[in-house]
Amino acid sequence: MDRLSGQTFLFGGFVADPKSTDNKAERPAPASAASGTEPAENGDASDNPYGLSDEQWAAVVAEEPEIAVIAGPGSGKTRTLISRIAYLIERKHTPPEQITAVTFTNKAANELKQRLSDHFSDQKITARMNVGTFHSLALAQLRRSGIDITLLDQEESAELQKEAEAEAGAAEAGLIYQQKLDSLQATDFDGLLTLALAESQKDHADLSRFTHLLVDEFQDANPIQYDMVKTWHGQGPARSLFVIGDPDQSIYGFRGADSACFERLQQDYPQLAMRKLGRNYRSAGRIVAASVPVIEEDGHRRQLSAARTDEGRIARYNAESAFNEAVFIAHEIDSLVGGVDMIAAHRRQNDKTRGLSDIAVLARTHRQLELIEQCLIEQGVPCIVAGRGSFLNDGAVRDCLAFFRFLLTPADGAALRRSLRSFECQTESIIRLQSRFRDSERKSVADLKKLAKKLKIDEADEFCSLAEALAPKVRRDKPEKLLRAYSAARFLEGNAALEQLIQAAPYYDKAFDLVEAAVSGQEIDIRRSAGGYRKDAVLLTTLHGAKGLEFPVVFLAGLQDGLLPLHTAKTVDTDEERRLCYVGMTRAEDELYLCTESPESPFLLRIPEDLVETVSPKRKYRQSGKQLTLFT
């Protein structure tokens, strides 16, 4: 197993000099390393007060105005980012108001805020910083400039585009679409960033809050986000830009992200300081050694070494069908957590019982996860399904979200329009009511009810009555209680999609948080329970949704050609699909299950056979109609 020690890889085109690698890092990792915690380097604590490795500390204290850190999986990226912020405040005496940290998901932003609050033991310091996604920071910037605008989610903007095309044809659709946005005082995701960029580029723009700009997961930036970073960074001796990420984990090419963004940054800033984090503290040696050849298939060597001294385990299961695979996963998870099937639980040598939340099942698409979810429920294993599932496209769910968006923000013209339509208000009445309400100085549910009565729009009575009943509760009651009240009032208790939205509600403290996640959240920002709500549950999500997460045990499902890489009508980006596989594999800390059926994914061919053990179930499985049947 020589490949398990000293495994290295190069990040993209940035080749590190092996001679510069810190030899001190080769000492045995402490026990905490096995759980993903980075070991502290020896030395004077006053020089390195955060317990970082030498390469992490070098990134934190870099003095250049532009710094790019290429951080391999499990190399302590978030810890380095937090330490950089702490260093600016505690050592450089930077006012927190001058620090902005950008993330790509609401979940990542919230976790970053929490970890910063834990570090400073003072939430007031964190509250003075600017931490959020590109979209939340852009919205805040526009509102500071006196521009109050509503953000449409992907589904709403798509509906509006279809309306525009139906009215004007393809040639004029863009103009009509923009007119519709303007009439609603709304914008879509791209429009929001474009507006914020334009505002930032004005001569009088106040960019003081971006004096020290830090960007997490920089490889996910699309062209307009890249331009925002450059504009926010600005010029001046007191300013700094600190970006961190990994080109090998660039998996959002379909949204315009470019894995070569680090190279572009180096071209734009010739004096850019490059730092590299190439020591993986998360995954056992066997997992690191198996992952590297997969990403190296592009012809470039990488530098990545495992800090952990234990080997870990990689198991491969060759399934006969998707159903066979799903049942195997359900039973293996039951075994891992010490479930009711104690025979299965004890058939593994050196068995270690896991908690449900220690386990994740990852797949390329949401559809693949549906059968696995069914099997887990049948097995009695509670799970959390994360991602923008198809239930969010359901009309009843869209109507419900629009209703609560209006209660939270009565100036949201798009939400009001959708809500009135769902209560079967006539188009002419909606236009009259909405036009007058938009021009009124005061905007509340009570004001809308008075206006509807004044205009004699009786068909709005039912909407106004329910809105009046729930408006006082929308910021007070739990989201699940609010959704069930809405569902009952609209006689929608039997709607399966709305029930899935209700299953998501317990994961949010406030209605605002749930609505924000549904409107602007990324894959991991949307969660719902399956098999009963429990905080301790197995996570099911896509490979995109798993980015940035880590688990002791990871199942990669559906590793077959056609699914990974995914073959669609569009051209297959094999390099990005390979990066997706790499991201999935490197989420695992201790155990990695590779589940495949014929034809297997070509990426599996890159994994050395001596690192993997092939497993087979002690039972056979068959499917009878919609029922799951087992027989020995």
Image (cartoon, rainbow, N blue to C red):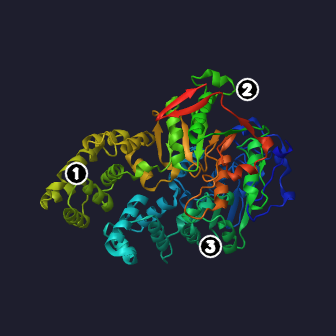
Point out the tag, 3 or 1, that comes first from the N-terminus.
3
Residue at the image position 75 percent from the left and 47 percent from the top: 290
Q: Amino acid at mark 1?
A: Phe
Point out the tag, 3 or 2, that comes first from the N-terminus.
3
> Crowding at label 1, few (<14), some or many (≥20) Cα neighbours within 10 Å?
some
Residue at the image position 71 percent from the left and 73 percent from the top: 270
User: Is 572 or 451 nearer to us in this picture?
Assistant: 572
> Crowding at label 3, few (<14), some or many (≥20) Cα neighbours within 10 Å?
few
Residue 209 lies left or right of residue 443; in this view the side is right
Give me the disc on residue 236.
3
Image coordinates of residue 242 in percent, x first then y, are 65, 62
User: Is 187 or 546 nearer to us in this picture?
Assistant: 546
Image coordinates of residue 409 in percent, x first then y, are 33, 56
The image quadrant of residue 152 is: bottom left
The residue that disc 2 covers is 349
Residue 265 lies left or right of residue 448; in this view the side is right
Element type at mark 1? helix
Quadrant assignment for the N terminus: top right
Residue at the image position 27 percent from the left and 54 percent from the top: 422
Q: Amino acid at mark 2?
A: Gln
Quadrant assignment for the C terminus: top right
The residue that disc 1 covers is 463
The image quadrant of residue 499 is: top left
Question: Is residue 240 at least partly visible in the picture?
Answer: yes
Tell me the distance, in whole angstroms, between the alpha carbons under discs 2 and 1. Answer: 61 Å
Question: Is residue 536 at least partly visible in the picture?
Answer: no
Q: Amino acid at mark 3?
A: Gly
Vertical relation: 396 (above or below) 154: above
